[in-house]
Image (tube, coloured by chain):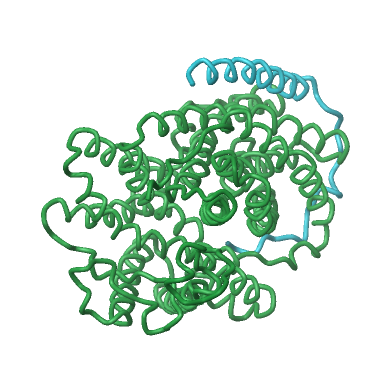
Amino acid sequence: MPEPALQKPLPEEEQYVELMPAEKKLIGWSLGLGIVLLAILILASRSLS
Amino acid sequence: MSSTQRFSLLKSEDWWAVWLGLFIFVLGLGKLAGMDLLGWVVKANVWTDLSKALTPVSDAYKGMPGILSLLLTYVFMLAVTTIGAATMGWNLKRFMAGFTIIFWITYACWICGNYAYIAATPDVLAKFKIPWSLSLTGEAGFIVALLVGLILANLFPGVTRFLQEAARPEWFIKTAIVILGATIGIKASESIGLAGTVLFRGFCAIVEAYLLYWPIVYFISRKYFRFTPEWAAPLASGISICGVSAAIATGAAIRSRPVVPIIVSSLVIVFAVVELVLLPWLAQGFLFNEPMVAGAWMGLAVKTDGAAAASGAITDALIRAKAMTALGIAYEKDWILMAAVTTKVFIDIFIGIWAFVLAVVWCYAIECKPGEKVSPVEIWYRFPKFVIGYVLTFVILLAIGLSSPDLVKTAKAGIAQADSLRGIFFALTFFSIGLVSDFRKLREEGMGKLALIYFLCLFGFIIWVGLFISWIFFHGIHPPVIKS
C-alpha cells in the first residue's frame, strides 16, 4: 500500500458542521431497522433450529 | 476506479484471487480423474526430528525428499503469482525477488511453529516422546510469521520497502478463501444441516453488524469528535464493517478525497493486527465450549479479510486444542474457521449495497450536486469478486458430495492437496500482514484523534457487540466431533 500523504489535510484542520437532518435520519433509520431486524432474526433463527 | 479497471478480469487482485484459487482447485480435482496433479506439494509436519518436518502431501510421492517437495512448491507458487503480477502490471523483478524472500522466511516460520514442543496436541505427546507442549497446533507457525513480519516492518523499514511489491495480504487471503470454499463444501456435504445453520446465522449476524455498528460509530465521530461527514463516513465503515475495502468503497461512494480512505485504511491495518494477536487467545480462554460463537466473533470483530480469516484459523486451532485438553472433545478441523469466513464473506458481499445506500444519501441529501446521479451498477463494481470463486468451489464440492457420496473420499484427498497450498497462502498472509503494519504511523501528525476514536469504538463496543451478536446466533451450535 502506498504511503498516505499525511501532511495535509487531516480532520483537525477542517471546518466542523453540525449533524444535518439527513444524517440524523440515516443514523435513526439504520439503528431502528437494526433493532427491529434483530428481534425478527432471533425469532427466525429460533424457529428454524 | 476507472471503467477499464472495473470491467477487466485480469487487472485486479480480486479477480486474480479467483483465477489462482480456481486453478489450484481444478488441479486438486484431478484426483477424481485418477490424476495426482498436486501430490508433490509440500506439507509441514509436527516434528522433533527436523529431517521429518517436510513431506509431500500425497503418499504417491513418499519417496520424494521433503526439501525437493518444498522447492517444487516454491517454484509453482512463484510461477502462478508472477503470471498474476505480470498481468496486473506490477514490477516483475521486485515482485519475484520480494516473493522469494517472503516465501522462504514464511516457510521457515511455519516449520518453527510446527516444533513438537510448540505444536503437539495432548493426544500425540507420547508419539513424540515429549512430556509437555504448548498445544498450539501447527498454526503456531502463522503467529511466528506474523511476529517476524511485524519486527521487519517496524525495525527494518528498508527491508520492508524492498519487499513491498510482493507483500499482498489481501491477494493471498482471497486466493486462500477461494480454495477454502472447496474444503468447506465437502465438509458441508457430510453435515448439510449444520452448514445451512451456519450460513443462515452468518447472514443474520452481519445484517446487525451493518445496521448497529455503523450509525453508532458515525454518530460518535460526528457529535463527540467533531469530524466532517467526509471523514466520519469512511471512518465508520472502516471501524465497523470490513476495514480497508469498506473504507475505500465508502470514500468512493461519498466522493471523498482519495487521502481520506487511505489514512483510515492504514489505521484499520494496524488495529487489525492488534485484534489478531489478542482475540483468538481471549476466545480460547472463555469460548472453548462455544466454538462456533468464537468463529463468528472473529468474522464480526476483526477487520480486513486477511486478519479475520487469519484469526479464524488461529481460533480454530486454539479452541480445538483447548477442547481436547479441558473437555476431552476432538472437534473436526475448519468448522470454526468456516463460521469466521462465512460471516466475513457476507460482510464483504454487503459492502457494495451499503456503499450504494451511502452514495444515494450523499448524492441526494448531504452533498447535493446538480445533475449528479447514482447508478445501481455501483453495487456490482463494489462487489468482492473473490466471493464468486468461494461460492463456486463450495457449491461444486457440495454438489459432488451430495450427489455421489462414493466420490467423497477421493474428492477429499484431492482437496486436501489443494488445501496444502491454501495453508501456504494463509501463512504468506500472516507474514505480509506483519510487513504492512507500520505502528509508527500512529505517531504521525494528526493521527492521534483518528486512532483514539478507532480505539474507543473498537474496544469500547464493537468487539463486545460482535460477541453479543455471535452469541445470540451461534450459541449451542457445535462442530462435528471426531468419533475416534
Residue B300 seen: yes
Identify the residue at image location x=60%, y=20%.
A42
Front-most of residues B171 and A8: B171
Residue B370: image x %, image y %? 64, 25
Identify the residue at image location x=59%, y=26%.
B357
In the displayed structure, does residue B265 sit left or right of residue B292? Answer: right
Identify the residue at image location x=13%, y=60%.
B35
Residue B355: image x %, image y %? 58, 33
Please tell me whether residue B403 is drawn above or below residue A14 in the rendered image.
Answer: above
Identify the residue at image location x=47%, y=69%.
B166
Residue B478: image x %, image y %? 50, 38
Which chain comes out green in the rendered image?
B
Please tell me whether residue B457 is drawn above or below residue B43 in the rendered image.
Answer: above
Q: Tag count in the figure?
A: 0
Please tell me whether residue B358 is drawn above or below residue A36 in the rendered image.
Answer: below
**In this structure image, what is the colour of chain A?**
cyan
In the displayed structure, does residue B385 sit left or right of residue B403? Answer: right
Residue B136's quadrant in the figure? Answer: bottom right
